[in-house]
Image (tube, rainbow, N blue to C red):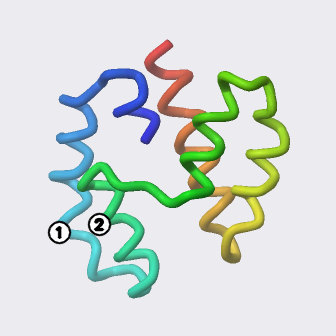
Amino acid sequence: AGLRLTGNQVLADQLATTLRPLLYRTTRSSCQDLTAAIEGRFCERLHRLIASATRDDVATASRNLATWGTSSGYDTTVGLTGAIAACA
């Protein structure tokens, strides 16, 4: 999401190419989430976090995303933050 959000389609495509063959190594749920992300579809919590950046409510949306799953929310938040920081 962070790569697509910052207009880095080439890097997003490269990451997708790298991840696809590894999807069998995670849970079914994570596989579905990662496949959706590779295809440019993201969970509602991530959409809320991205939208919140324009409403100055990033902290609330980040906390909401972080509560998703055991570690998925934290992993997603860190990945999004890292992608945006790397592309800024």
Q: For mark 1, give the secondary structure.
A: helix
Judged from this view, the residue extending furthest toward the top is 88
Q: Residue 87, relative to residue 34: is it above or below?
A: above
List the residue tagged with mark 1.
21
Q: Does 20 sit left or right of 1 as displayed?
A: left
Q: Position of residue 26 (x, y in %)?
A: 40, 80
- The residue drawn where x is 41% and y is 69% is 33
Q: Residue at x 76, y 34 (%)?
A: 58
Residue 68 tag number: none
Estimate the x, y position of residue 81 in percent, counting from the top left: 60, 34
- Residue indicated by mark 2: 35
Quadrant of res 39:
bottom left
Amino acid type at circle 1 is Pro
Instruction: Name the residue rendered at 55%, 46% in the picture.
Output: 47
Q: x, y (%) of residue 61?
A: 75, 46
**Residue depicted at x 63% and y 46%:** 48
Callout 2: helix, strand or loop? helix
In the depicted view, which residue is nearer to us: 54 or 74?
Answer: 54
Instruction: Give the residue type that dot 2 points to.
Output: Thr
What crowding class fits label 2: few (fewer than 14 Cα within 10 Å), some (14-19), or many (20 or more)?
Answer: some
